[in-house]
Amino acid sequence: MPYDPSAFPPFAVTVDLVVLTVRRHALCALAVRRGEQPFQGRWALPGGFVRPDEDLAQAAARELAEETGLRAHDPGAPAQDNGAHLEQLATYGDPKRDPRMRVVSVAHLALAPDLPAPRAGGDANIARWAPVEELLQQGGYARDGEPVAPLAFDHAQILADGVERARSKIEYSSLATAFCPPEFTVGELRRVYEAVWGVALDPRNFHRKVTGTPGFLVPTGGTTTRQGGRPAQLFRAGGATLLNPPMLRPEV
Amino acid sequence: MPYDPSAFPPFAVTVDLVVLTVRRHALCALAVRRGEQPFQGRWALPGGFVRPDEDLAQAAARELAEETGLRAHDPGAPAQDNGAHLEQLATYGDPKRDPRMRVVSVAHLALAPDLPAPRAGGDANIARWAPVEELLQQGGYARDGEPVAPLAFDHAQILADGVERARSKIEYSSLATAFCPPEFTVGELRRVYEAVWGVALDPRNFHRKVTGTPGFLVPTGGTTTRQGGRPAQLFRAGGATLLNPPMLRPEV
DNA sequence: ATCATAGTCGTCTCCCTGACGATAAACACG
DNA sequence: CGTGTTTATCGTCAGGGAGACGACTATGAT
């Protein structure tokens, strides 16, 4: 009996964000500390209600801007401006996922270059970048000795799904450039792959592969030595979005 | 201000289904004729409200069973029983997508072997299998001369997204076997790829590829001549879900 | 000057793929 | 009963891409 307007169960609809970046050779996600019940004091993914007049993508872009100050650029845009990549991830609607009421959350995945420091949210939430490995471990202690509690709600599952999406998508798309500043070197791009996949890649074969894929990288003419060593050529992301053949993720 | 229980905008949440199958060498989708406003008399994807106590996947499985009689098997199951593959596709929440109220639809993608005939839905809806190419063309006339109206709501977009998901996913997963009966020949599997991709594949190279990929196909010992010609070996789907290296979709 | 660090170019081999030839086993005809 | 048609299956060969790794280059640090 589809669409009987007189009798439909009301749901709350939220967007949650998996915002990923690469900091200090580690894949990190943005986490906010909850200030209220339930899960008060626990870390959670940023998110909030979808407003009555906005699209899901708009809601996600608004939350992203509130939490990080990042603009999301339109999907399909050349990805040059220092906006973040934003795409829908999946939707989570278990009846018990929020103990208070029926909430359906449309999770989004955002990829951003390394940012200076997390900005306080619109409502002065505490926010931080944390290695995903630390956020996903169940209990235990972080490297700084502080006790780690699992993420609130089903956010561990959402984060895991987002990380898996990012890991697989940089294989066959040029999405890894979304983790880089507008201009970057081949070595910086390689370190992105290494951080996201958690593997070491051969610098020579990687260089051959990415510079040999037409449309992936466009040289800007400049060079930099910000990584030390011999100066490296600077590149921008090219127009190609699909990599064919893909980058191969090493086994194991 | 996340999760203020006293003030959240209420949404209706539905599931819509993109149910795909291969019939007579063509990729077909299940469409139902709408019996009420809006879009009365137009074709639409099957779907319905999510009930207050059920998960999104449960709602999708229930709708699928109501429309087709198919059981969906759990994700990760060996896919042997004649259940259909069911996975979440994407969520559509444009404020204007339903003229009556704010509806967020969690679309799901189902892949099924060729079925005898579409069963009337629980409320006796008219349902039929139609080639996706016919459902996606805007206006014009179908092959049988009947005029074609675009699908209701944003269902053309949802269908297009589902088809694209299926097309890309059979590249790197063993999902194409979801279109086949429990036992099938290499030729039947090849015709699935050809129908979904709309290309012709070399039978010899295809045979070498699929039989050479460990875990993809398991011979059952039997043979069949139901396609004419020399008897062909019968196979079941193997346990492998990811194809590495993937099937390559020809250019163009 | 020497060393450490990165970047870049080459080479070699192996494996996969695409393009195709050839053979095998059924059925439909006359 | 041969002959043609259809589909399945095995083989061969050339080309491209990827992994492994050697060699050289251009910086800064000591």
Image: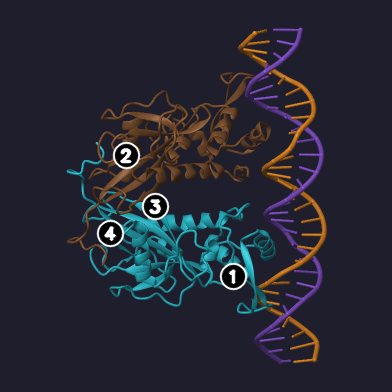
Chain colours: A brown, B cyan, C purple, D orange
- The three-letter code of the residue at mark 4 reads Asp
> In this image, A143 relative to B208: left or right?
left
B228 to B158, vertically: above or below? below
Give the residue pinned by disc 1.
B188
Classify mark 2: residues with Cα within 10 Å, few (<14), some (14-19) or many (20+): many
Q: Which chain carries label 3?
A: B
Residue A88 can be seen in this image: no
Q: Which chain carries label 1?
A: B
- The label on residue B53 is 4
Secondary structure under tag 3 reads strand
Classify mark 3: residues with Cα within 10 Å, few (<14), some (14-19) or many (20+): some
Residue pictured at 64% horizontal, 76% vertical: B222
Residues indicated by labels 3 and 2 sit on the same polypeptide chain: no
Give the residue pinned by disc 2.
A47
Classify mark 1: residues with Cα within 10 Å, few (<14), some (14-19) or many (20+): some
B147, B110: nearer the viewer: B110
- The label on residue B90 is 3
Residue pictured at 57% horizontal, 63% vertical: B193
What separation in Å lies between label 3 and label 1 (alpha carbons)?
A: 30 Å
What separation in Å lies between label 3 and label 2 (alpha carbons)?
A: 18 Å
Q: What percent of the width, then of the height, locates residue B129? A: 42, 71
What separation in Å lies between label 3 and label 4 (alpha carbons)?
A: 21 Å
Residue pictured at 17% horizontal, 61% vertical: A6
Number of the front mark, 4 or 1: 4
Residue A132 can be seen in this image: yes
> In this image, A210 relative to A148: left or right?
right
